[in-house]
Amino acid sequence: MKKLILALCITAVSFPALAIQRYNVQSMSCAAVQAAVNRDGAAILRYRSARNPSLPLYDRYVRNSAYCDGQQYAKPSSVPTRDNKRCPVRKCADTPFDDFFGD
């Protein structure tokens, strides 16, 4: 019984990490990337580096700040898509202390 409970706990903890969708955005339109992030809430977007095309880049992008950790917010960013070199999306970033404390 203890093994079953332990297995369920491990599965419950690891499940959210497995649920995130991954997309190769350079084969998608900007509208499709934005729709995917809005639909999924959070997604891993992958693309090739502009400086070194053999280098894949990726990050986690989100619909809004609700998908970020406690002291983070959804910062505007962009990714290169099939039809737009700078498709607007958002990714989590740490809240600067100056802004956080109202200075």
Image: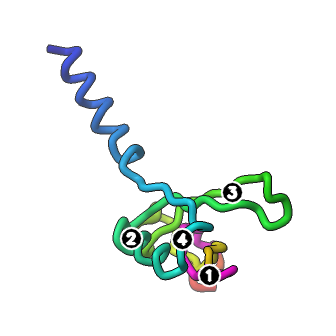
Q: Residue at x 19, y 19 (%)?
A: 4
Q: Which residue is drawn at 36% across and 49% down?
A: 19
Mark closer to the observer (3, 1)? 1
The residue wearing badge 3 is 57
Q: Is mark 3 on a helix, strand or loop?
A: strand
Q: Where is residue 18 in the image (x, y as percent from the top left)?
A: 39, 44
Q: Position of residue 52 (x, y in %)?
A: 84, 58
Mark closer to the observer (1, 2)? 1
The residue wearing badge 2 is 66
Specify the label residue 83 is tagged with.
1
Identify the mark nearer the N-term, 3 or 1.
3
Identify the mark nearer the N-term, 1 or 2.
2
Question: 10 Å neighbourhood of mark 4: few (<14), some, or many (≥20)?
Answer: some
Specify the label residue 28 is tagged with.
4
Mark closer to the observer (4, 3)? 4
In the image, taking residue 48 as reference, residue 61 lies left or right, namely left
Mark closer to the observer (3, 2)? 3
Identify the mark nearer the N-term, 2 or 4.
4
Amino acid type, residue under disc 1 in the picture: Asp
Q: Is mark 1 on a helix, strand or loop?
A: loop
